[in-house]
Each structure stands twice: as C-alpha cells, then as structure tokens.
Image (cartoon, helix red, strand yellow):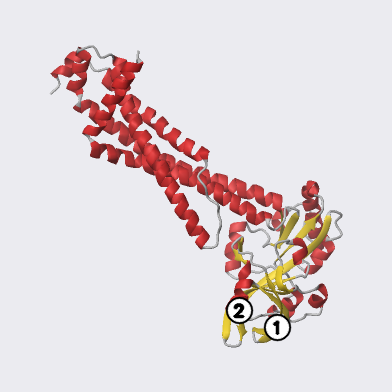
Amino acid sequence: MITKGNLKLVLHLAVNGLKTNKGRTVLTTIGIVIGIATIVIVLSAGRGLEKFIFKQIESFGADTIEVEMKIPSVSDMEMASSMVGGAEVTTLKTDDFEALKSIPNVDNYYAAILGQYKSVYKNKSVRAMIFAVTASLPEIDKDTKVQEGRFFTDREDKAQAKVVVLGPEIKEQLFGSESAVGKNIKINQMSFKVIGVAEARGNIMYFNFDKMIYMPLITGQKQLLGIDHVMYGFLSIHDTTKTAETVSDINSMMRRRHDLPPNDPKKDDFRTTSMQEALEMVGTVTFGMTLLVLAIAGISLVVGGVGIMNIMYLSVVERTREIGLRKAIGASNSLIKAQFLVEALLITGIGGLAGIVLGTILVVIIDLGAKLQGYDFGMTITLDAVLLGFASALIFGVLFGLYPARKASELSPVEALRYE
C-alpha cells in the first residue's frame, strides 16, 4: 500500500529518474506537446469559427428565408464546379418573389444579382463588385445602412435610374477625402450618379460589402448585364415558429410556377434555405471538422504514448539491477509500479502543460492574424479545452505507462540482481 511518506519517496525517485536522461525525456515529451497543443487549437478555433459564421448568418436576419438558383439534378459540389465552368440558371425571376409575397407568412423580399466591372472617377479606377438589388434591401438586411446621402428608391429601380451607393472602401479608393455624393462615376463606360455612401460593414460570408457598389436591380439587369433573371433573394417572415411550413409553401409555389414535379426536389431549379437551417448545417459541419482534426490530434498522442511506453520499457531494462536491489531491501511491487507510473505521468503532465501554453500562444497569433485580414473570429482559450487537453495527457500517461510499470514490479529480485 502506498502511504503519504511512500508517495513523497516515489515522486522523488521518479523525478531523479527523469533527470538522469533529460534529453530522452524532452524528446519523448514532444509528441505529447504537439498532440495537446493541437487539441487546444482545434477546440478554440472550432468554437471561434462557429461563432463567427453564426454571427455572419444571423446578420442576414433569423427571420429570413433565402431562395437561390440551382442547377437541377446536380449536387452542391457539382454545382460549384458547373458554375465555375460557365453553367448558368436563368429561371429565377423577380416575378417569382413578387408571387411569393402572397404566402401568408411572407412580409417582403429583396432580389439581387452580382457582377464585376471597372469603375472610374477622373484618373482613378477600381474593379468593384456590382450589387444590383431591389430597393427593399435595407428593410430586410438591417445591417445595410447609409452614412452619407441616401439609398435608392423602388421608383428609381423601376425607372432604371443610373444611380449608385458606394461601399466605404470603394468611395475611399475613388474619391479619397473628397465628398462622393452628387458626383458621377463611370461603370462599363456608362455614367452613374453617386447618391450615397454605405456604412462600413466588413466581410460577411466571403463578401466584402465595403468593396461593393449598390445599384437598382433593373438598372443592373438592363443597362449592364443584359439579363432578366436574378441569382438569389431573401424573403422576410413575421412568424419564425412557422418557418418550416413557410419553406414548404415556398417550394410548392416555386414548383408550380416553374412547371416542376411536386415531389422531386432533385429536379428543382431553385434552392430554399431558412437561416435556422443554415445555422444547423454550419453546426453540423464545424462539429464534423472538429472531430476529424481531434482524431488526428489523437493519433499524435498515440504516437507520443507509444514513445513513452518504449522509453519507459527501456528504462526498466536499464535499471533492472536497481529494481532488484530495491526489492531485496524491502521495496514492494506496488511501490516499484508506482515509481514508473509516476514517471510516465510526469512526462505526459509536463507535456500537457507545455502543449496548453503552446496552443494558447498559437491561438492568440492566429486570432491576431485573422483580425489583420478583417475577420474577427474571437478565438479564446476555453476552460473545457484546457481541461480536455490536460486530462488527455494524464490518461495517455496511465495507458502507456502502466505496462512498463507492471513489468518493473513483476521482476524477480534474484534474477534482477544477476542481470548484467
């Protein structure tokens, strides 16, 4: 039985044993340090990224439903490849959104399409993303605000008015400190009057709204793009408890309007996503990614644990005569086992603490780097990440230190003393 006095002796012997082979101890600890640091980074990064994406999605409003174009019978991954290859769906129209307004739970909508053109003011030019959208955008996307001037009206949209609202970075690049409102810029060799400058908003879902130029949807369709369809739109609803029912109503109406089979989603040329569904999908994806990387970190810990087991077993062999001598003068099996088990726990414990420190430093560096790029992930070290990292280190210490410790305790004193 291990008493308090014996425990102090065991700890003293274990520390001396590790000091005897400092280089080997340090090298053995590296695998544990890497594994624990990875656990801390993954959990912190995963939580930060999840909160960041949730915040991005929620910025569009929890009471909204997105309807976007989709290539029929094509998966999301295949669709991304097809879009890059030039495939385009032209069946989604503003009239579809006007019709969807008749659904009881739908309040309003905005529809939009994106393009990219060179914009010029005097001797300055910039290639900007054109965000052609209906005038109802600020009513639904509450984060769309104008700091100077005004947003365009529905009347200007229907009249194909050549007016624009500049994102703050575009305004800065073209006008600098000069006021932009009331001035004219050229987009694709056509003159547009600046009527407003939007408030700074930053990156939302891979789009930098500060580098966009807003213009009336019909103006963008007819004057620039020569099309009559839209890429996507958002519908605002007034009762979020009926979101699933509203999505079903939207799907049914869209299929009727586009002459699609009523019960064959694969043939849909549109996709409907509520913000609640988007949040659930993000949660599922980030959880899966976290598990995957944690599994990789687990492999690192296993490799480090096997290294510990090998080193501890080697230490048992090297110290066979010492073990025999201690047994001959009365050391019990449990005391010998405890000494080598404590050595393993010290290695993994120190490695765990070092891994937590390293992980914390890297998390801070990653977070600062993200902020410099305009992405506020808000990565922080959480208590559960620290506890999981340290607990994992100790568990692996027990698992991989138990076998060598048991082998040491089972040595026969007589055979051990004869060992050369």
* Residue 383 location (% of width, % of height): 51, 39
Q: Which residue is mark 1?
A: 192
Viewer-proximal residue among 89 and 314 = 314
Within 10 Å of disc 2 (Cα), the crowding (few <14, some 14-19, many 20+) is few
Count of number-bearing discs: 2
Instruction: Name the element at disc 2.
Output: loop
* Residue 317 location (% of width, % of height): 21, 26
Left or right: 403 in relation to 420: right
Quarter residue 147 falls in: bottom right
**Amino acid type of the residue that numbered disc 2 sits on in the rendered structure:** Ser
* Quarter containing the C terminus: top left
Viewer-proximal residue among 283 and 195 = 195
Within 10 Å of disc 1 (Cα), the crowding (few <14, some 14-19, many 20+) is some
Instruction: Name the element at disc 1.
Output: strand
Which of the two discs, 2 and 1, sits closer to the camera?
A: 2
Residue at the location (74% across, 56% down)?
Answer: 65
Left or right: 317 in relation to 123: left
Quarter residue 218 falls in: bottom right
Quarter residue 352 falls in: top left
Tag 2 and tag 1, C-beta contact below 8 Å: no
* Quarter containing the N terminus: top left
* Residue 38 location (% of width, % of height): 43, 45
Residue 86 visible, this angle: yes
* Residue 204 location (% of width, % of height): 62, 61
Residue at the location (63% across, 72% down)?
Answer: 168
- The alpha-carbon separation of the residues under discs 2 and 1 comes to 20 Å
Q: Which residue is mark 2?
A: 177
Residue at the location (60% across, 50% down)?
Answer: 51
